[in-house]
């Protein structure tokens, strides 16, 4: 009896330190396994080549943890699980922690990591708009080099980023700032759902007026995007309800949503300004309350 040839499967490797991990990535095509909440499914369904080696990063302690520097800079290890990030008291609530608290259910958040959520690069990823709104930088490390890139330039399309195959996202670096940020989304269910649309906002107040603002959108384009017209419209205002509402409407100048199984383009465009108003409002409350980011 003839047997059907089985497709090749890559090796499983579990390095104990960053140097060993990067050496494995430098050898050839490999899939990085952090929480595995997406990778396991994608590999089973053939979306990821099973011939790729699997490099499990869970034992590399340098990739986990949340810290706040003396200057206020926030550093988040890419292998930090979303549940830890959502519940941390090391840093104040912000757009990134808001997004982390909304990914999947608690089981997914316990396994899934912030780095995995970012590198998956889903246009509807809940932490991605927060990365843009907080002006976060992403550290990419290979065996021979290190580069720090702005979150805004990291995403190139659905599921695609500028990360090279031999590079690893090691840290998310959020610069110090006295402002406040928040992320809000619209879904049809309270949990275990992907964003129909999401909005992250950052505002900074001085002498009662907004001196800096950024607004970012998720599930509203092929990648998470900044909405510069909306952010710029907030600067110089006292952020009263009318100003916030007017700026929120301007997110439609940037949004290019599509029709898909979660919603229509028309519905997304209807919902986006309302979600933007909510995100800006929470960011303002945090900025006035003294919470950084």
Image (cartoon, rainbow, N blue to C red):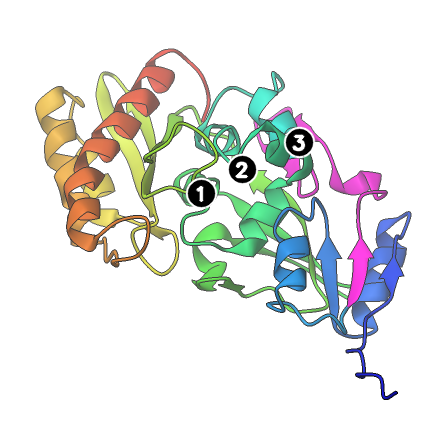
Q: Residues within 10 Å of mark 3 (few under 14, many from 20)?
A: some
As displayed, is residue 216 above or below residue 180? below
Look at 73% across and 70% down and name the residue there.
50
As displayed, is residue 144 above or below residue 273? below
Mark closer to the observer (2, 3)? 3
Look at 43% across and 38% down and name the residue there.
193
As displayed, is residue 79 above or below residue 162? above
Which residue occupies the extreme bottom position in the image?
A: 2
Residue 19: image x %, image y %? 87, 56
* Residue stretch rendered in magenta on the structure: 53-80
| Viewer-side residue, 272 vs 249 | 272
| Viewer-side residue, 235 vs 77 | 77
| Viewer-side residue, 263 vs 273 | 263
Q: Residues within 10 Å of mark 1 (few under 14, many from 20)?
A: some
Label 2, label 3: how many angstroms apart (C-alpha)? 23 Å
Residue 171: image x %, image y %? 66, 44
- Residue topped by disc 1: 135
The numbered mark at residue 174 is: 2
Residue 255: image x %, image y %? 23, 53
Q: Is residue 262 left or right of residue 19?
A: left
The numbered mark at residue 107 is: none
- The reply to whether callout 2 and callout 3 are in contact (CB within 8 Å) is no
Q: Is residue 170 left or right of residue 200?
A: right
Residue 139 on the magenta span: no
Residue 41 shows in the view: yes
């Amino acid at each position: 009896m003839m047997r059907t040839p089985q497709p090749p499967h890559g090796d499983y490797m579990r390095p104990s330190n960053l140097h060993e991990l990067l050496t494995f990535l430098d050898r050839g095509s490999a899939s990085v396994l952090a929480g595995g909440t997406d990778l396991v499914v994608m590999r089973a369904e053939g979306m990821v080549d099973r011939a790729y080696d699997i490099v499990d990063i869970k034992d590399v302690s340098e990739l986990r943890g949340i810290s706040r520097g003396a200057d206020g800079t926030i550093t988040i290890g890419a292998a930090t699980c979303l549940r830890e990030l959502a519940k941390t008291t090391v840093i104040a609530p912000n757009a990134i922690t808001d997004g982390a608290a909304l990914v999947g259910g608690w089981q997914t958040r316990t396994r899934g990591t912030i780095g995995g959520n970012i590198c998956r690069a889903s246009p509807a990823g809940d932490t991605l708009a927060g990365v843009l709104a907080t002006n976060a930088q992403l550290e990419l490390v290979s065996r021979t080099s290190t580069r720090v890139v702005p979150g805004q330039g990291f995403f190139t399309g659905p599921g695609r980023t500028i990360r090279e195959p031999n590079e690893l996202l090691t840290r998310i670096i959020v610069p110090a700032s006295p402002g406040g940020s928040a992320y809000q989304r619209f879904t049809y269910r309270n949990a275990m759902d992907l964003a129909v649309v999401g909005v992250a906002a950052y505002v900074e107040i001085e002498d009662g007026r907004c001196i800096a603002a950024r607004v970012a959108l998720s599930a509203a384009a092929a990648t998470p995007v900044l909405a510069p017209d909306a952010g710029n419209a907030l600067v110089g205002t006292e952020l009263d309800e009318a100003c916030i509402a007017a700026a929120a409407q301007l997110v439609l100048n940037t949004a290019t949503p599509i029709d898909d199984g979660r919603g229509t383009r028309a519905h997304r465009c209807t919902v986006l300004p309302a979600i933007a108003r909510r995100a800006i409002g929470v960011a303002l409350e945090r900025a006035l309350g003294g919470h950084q980011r």
